Image: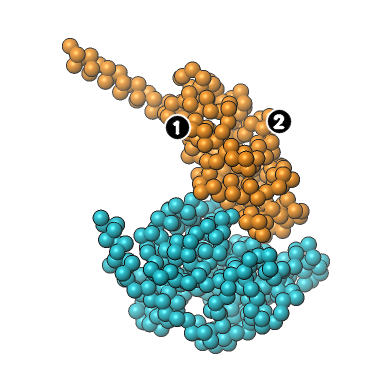
Amino acid sequence: MKSLERALMGGALGLLLGNAYALDGNKIFTEGGSQPGAMSCVACHGADGLGLAAAGFPRLAGLPAHYVRKQLADFASGARNNPVMQPLAKALTDLEIAALSDAVAAMPAPQTAMPSRSQMPADPIEKLALQGAWERQIPACVSCHGPGGVGVGDAFPPLASQPAAYLAAQLSAWQNGTRRNDPNDLMGHIAKSMTADEVQGVAHYFASLPAQAKP
Amino acid sequence: MKAILLTAVLAAAPAHAATIAMEDQSQLQPTAQPDASAFKPPLESELPDNAYGKLVRQGYALFVDTKRLAPQFVGNGLNCSNCHLDQGRMANSAPLWGAYPMYPAYRKKNDKVNTFAERLQGCFQFSMNGGIPPAADSPEITALSVYAYWLSSKAPLGVELPGRGYPEVAQPAKGYDLAQGAQVYTGQCAVCHGAEGEGQKVGGAYAMPPLWGKDSYNWGAGMHRINTAASFIKHNMPLGKIGSLSDQQAWDVAAYINRHERPQDPRLVEGSVEKTRVKFHANDGVNLYGQTVDGVLIGQGIR
């Protein structure tokens, strides 16, 4: 009875898919995915998802879900080149990626104080962050990444509360082309105009912005 | 097929490239200027620590944080610095140092000689959709004037400096195409300004400005002219990739942006879009106010 078999198989598949939709993103985060190689995230990104500053592993907590999904897809495709993340991203199923992205987006993130637009920069690095260097076509970091670098929408991730080593590594990756997954080469274009000192400077600037005062 | 037809219809539509009367000093057509040879405004580090320096800083703050600091005079979600990049310092981005030394000047817009204070009031009334603008001797106009004066330090008076205004980008021979403009918008602009021109907010305030709708410039603002918007876009957008759009793309996307509804022209004549078009828009560069696109009257305003 092939048709009965098929019906049973279909039912089982439906059940599987139904379960898959209810995948627990937090469980994937702490224990890994269903396939070999899909290791847990906590070892590097921390149980709270805040990253490991000393090693330059970024925080994931509070990043936009759409952004995280895109990064995992880009790790898998190589548009964002990372030897550790590529096999991991490839080992996650689409449904696992979706559940995981939603879970990390919902994790509590540090609230960075948002300085007002009218704050005048105190030094050249703060000037680059708040006003840019237009003679080299470098807009202010905050003009896209938001006041205090808190991130804007799905395309412009937070810089605040990311480890300086991570931010500097990303700017270097934009410069040397190992990361090229931005819309219209917006970031790559800008990073290539930055000096090594500026890369280190703004990375430390955003990594060390003070947290928002508790009301 | 539908898209092709639409394109053909739009391409065939007259572009209304009315010539601007040249005695209008506010609409002189400057030439593009590479930054290297542009006027250099003073640095913030050179600001004196006295009453004058303090007022310059207040003007700076108002210029870059207008909505938050002068909410009673800003009826939309914009700041001065949205259309005057680099805090009003950048060449080809209508820098304050290019404007301040050119006033008082005759403006066709209100058919009289305007002081710089009156020019600023015009910005508030139209670009900021602010209703009744701050008085000429108000703290807001004073601080902004002082900031502009300071940026113009050592600039010659009454001399058109290279890099002033938005250097005119001539209308392409084929006119403009709204369908092509929509494509440019989706591919290049929507990532920041949103799929529906709505801008993007962080913490309740706009981080990226809305280009149409209730929180953008109104139908009386200079930016509603397609020629002006095309010139601004060509010389200032996308951020960090200035000059990457062709003249044609700049015109197409400027027309696409300015075919969308925005707050009504505060000079509305007897409640009539047509009367307002005839009086204020018929000879004001290239614009779509009071015209019909795809069967819809443009310029009805939005609240």
Tag 2's secondary structure?
Answer: helix
Disc 2 and disc 1 in contact, CB within 8 angstroms: no
Q: CA distance from mark 2 to mark 1?
A: 28 Å
Q: Chain of mark 1?
A: A
Viewer-nearest residue: A154 or B39:
B39
Viewer-nearest residue: A58 or A25:
A58
Tell me the shade of chain B.
cyan
* Residue at 51% over, 19% down: A37
Q: Identity of the amino acid at label 2?
A: Ala
Tell me where residue B78 sits by quadrant. Answer: bottom right
Q: Identity of the amino acid at label 1?
A: Ala
* Residue at 72% over, 69% down: B41
Q: How dense is the environment of label 1, judged by Cα within 10 Å: few (below 14), some, or many (20 and up)?
A: some
Q: Give the percent coordinates (x, y) of residue B126.
A: 51, 73
Q: Chain of mark 2?
A: A
- The tag on residue A98 is 1
- Find the residue positioned furthest to the top: A1
Can see residue A174?
A: yes
**Image vertical order of residue A167 relative to residue A29, above or below:** below
Q: Give the percent coordinates (x, y) of residue B39.
A: 69, 70
Q: Earlier in the sequence, mark 2 or mark 1?
A: 2
Residue tagged by mark 2? A54
Q: Give the percent coordinates (x, y) of residue B255.
A: 41, 66
**Image vertical order of residue B178 relative to residue A78, above or below:** below
